[in-house]
Image (cartoon, grey):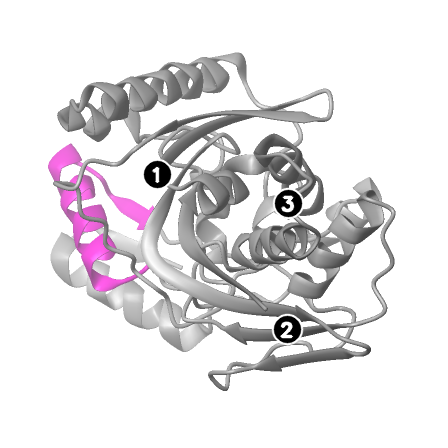
Amino acid sequence: MIKVTVPATSANVGAGFDALGLALSLHNTVTLEESDRIDIQSSDGSLIPTGTSNLVYRSARAVFDQLGQPLPGICIRQENPIPMARGLGSSSACIVAGILGANALLGSPLTPRQMLTLATSIEGHPDNVAPAMLGGFVTSVYDEGQVYSARKAINEELAFAAFIPNFKLLTEKARAALPKTVERADAVYNLSRAALATAAFCDGDYELLKVATKDALHQQYRLPLIPGLNDDEGHLENFARTIKALGRVQAVELLPYHRLGKNKYALLGRAYALESLGPMSKEDLARRAAFVAERLGGTKVLF
């Protein structure tokens, strides 16, 4: 029997979209054992697929297939403290566990780079699977079918806090919200900060992370996917304060999210990432408008 422990990860660190990631101190534990049948169960009551669609199984199967070895069956037990679809690399943890476990079952014929390349081919990008497999802070590049990574141990003086929302956001939906192309200025903005973030971790100059963790490639496009992110009272308070500071503003109009552009996505052949997000109700919009109006005094608030 093989036992594998894989950490949660945080990817897209700062400006390092699809490139920078780090391992956290929350772990999944998976045991694998060859069997004459497929036997997959959760040992902590978490809901997981128990058939061939299980991601640990699929990843283990990929190792056997790559090496030309038969896999008549396998016994897998999963303990999953890493919450699913919460941005902590739960899928990558399953992929890495399956690959490491299967490779160990076969006598460890694959090198770390081969395993990391296989994991990236399954996940589609290396920023989660690399730190899940290597630990620490990792910079990765996927080039011509090979993954190249550089690892830096994380200083113990650093502590990370994970804010886990009470809703799920699948990676495929988050990626679908991104534009196909970006402005050169945004690309340069992120390139410079991704390089600075890497240097900050290597030199231990963590004050630089205040600047290096700013992003222009993905965060702004994903904001609508997060319910309540920019329409709570704190944001409305700051909005009203900004408008009031401008002076001589006669009226402002609150424009909530709507679905009027949904059909355009279909015409362009693109998936509509906000399919599950409904528009704000008139009652909720009126309540927010009254909140802003109260703070603006004589300025009209339209909605």
Q: Is residue 98 magenta?
A: no
Q: Residues within 10 Å of mark 1 (few under 14, many from 20)?
A: some
Q: Looking at the image, is mark 1 or mark 2 nearer the viewer?
A: 2
Give SS at disc 3: loop
- Of circles 3 and 1, the one toward us is 3
- Which residue position holds label 3? 108
Residue 24: % across, % down: 33, 51
Q: Is residue 278 visible?
A: no
Q: Earlier in the sequence, mark 2 or mark 3?
A: 2
Q: Amino acid at mark 1?
A: Gly
Residue holding disc 2: 76
Residue 25, compared with residue 150, is above or below; it is: below
Identify the residue position indicated by label 1 in the image: 136
Three-letter amino acid code at the position of disc 2: Ile
For the residues labelled 1 and 2, the Cα–Cα distance comes to 27 Å
Position of the N terminus by quadrant: bottom right
Pointer 1 or 2: first along the chain: 2
Which segment is the magenta one? Answer: 229-252
